Amino acid sequence: MNVKGILKGSLCVMMAGAMLCGCQSSGSSEADYPSKSINVIVPFAPGGGSDVLTRSMMEYLELPNDQNFVVINVDGAAGYTGCQQAFNSANDGYTLLAHNPMDVVSYTLGGTTDVELYKELELICGIADDFNFLVTNKQSGWTSLEDVIEYVKAHPGEVKVGNTGSMNCNMADCLRVLDAMGIKDDVTVVPYDSGSDNKVAAMGNHVQLSVNTGADIQASVESGDLVPLLVISDRRSKSLPDVPCTKEVGYDVVTTKPRGMYAPKGTSPEKIQVISDAIAQVCSNEEFQQKVLSLGLEVNFVPGSELQTKIDGWVKDIAPMFDEMKQEA
């Protein structure tokens, strides 16, 4: 037999075997996922809404191979530091990001980064909804939007409105609602570093109105220190069901504040599906739903592609307001 023929035949067999092993290894890797704990970056300090939601979810989470999430708190730059760390992480399925999609949008529209992170990160799913509320304090005596509008029109320049952050989606929605009420030019908007600071300012009457999240105001509404007037959404919030939403009063400002889970771009669809399915199962748990509701949030599982479509629509709605804010800055 020709020696060259033998060598050539052996080489082909070896290459075929190597290719087969490679395929089997790759398939096994996907099938065994996750084979270790999955790090979830929460881009805020412990104790915040995203942190508590993620840790609560972990109590009910059932991942394959008895694995679970491990929370990694990366605080800084209003969540951008942790978001950027997740963006730069390996797309092997072992680093995820728990974040508010509209905050991720804010980093781009507000000019923190030129990268469209809300598109460049893989949105796995939405887990729960938070809502921005327009509230007043008990000192004002106002109980309705009509009360507010009547007073502001009679006292232009007197009323201050607190907002959580500046050059973000919270500010954009705050300004859009004030514009819809016809009082945007008659009030002064005051930005605060956190929802907690914003709440304290409203309770102390440093501001007479405030736009803040349900999670931040829940306890103060229950105590009677804050009075909710309006929820910015296309539906009422289950945590405060008696408060009208912007859609029903005729204001075209309906962006909610979803809490979602992201993965670095390029994470395999199979691994994305494993995480999505596990979270969907948690969200169907009634005990988890009640626990989340007590936090001022509302469980609302939405597949990533569906939520991304909704977010893209919201971006088109609020982008002009960011342009206006930049011009006035």
Image (spheres, rainbow, N blue to C red):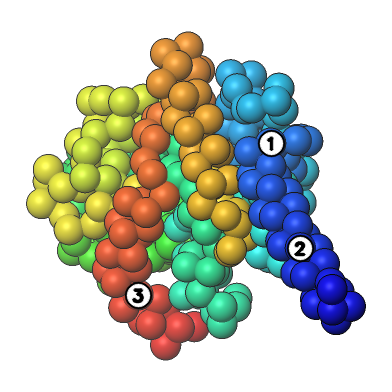
Image spot of residue 127 (x, y percent): 46, 37
* Type of the residue with mark 3: Ala
The quadrant of the rendering that contains the N terminus is: bottom right
In the foreground, 8 or 94: 8
In the foreground, 226 or 173: 173
Which residue does the image show at 38% across and 44% down from the upper left? Answer: 303
Q: CA distance from mark 1 to mark 2?
A: 28 Å
Q: CA distance from mark 3 to mark 2?
A: 59 Å
* Type of the residue with mark 1: Asp
In the foreground, 5 or 56: 5
Please, which residue is most extreme toward the bottom here? 327
First-in-chain label (1 vs 3): 1
Q: Residues within 10 Å of mark 2 (few under 14, many from 20)?
A: few
* Type of the residue with mark 2: Val
**What element does badge 2 sit on?**
helix
Q: Residues within 10 Å of mark 3 (few under 14, many from 20)?
A: some
Image spot of residue 32 (x, y percent): 69, 36
Q: Which mark is residue 32?
A: 1
Image spot of residue 13 (x, y percent): 76, 63
Mark 2 sits on what residue?
13
Mark 3 sits on what residue?
319
**What element does badge 1 sit on?**
loop
Q: Tell me the mark number nearer the camera, choosing from 1 and 2.
A: 2
Q: Is residue 23 left or right of residue 262?
A: right
First-in-chain label (3 vs 2): 2
Task: Choose top left, top right, bottom left or bottom right for residue 52.
Answer: top right
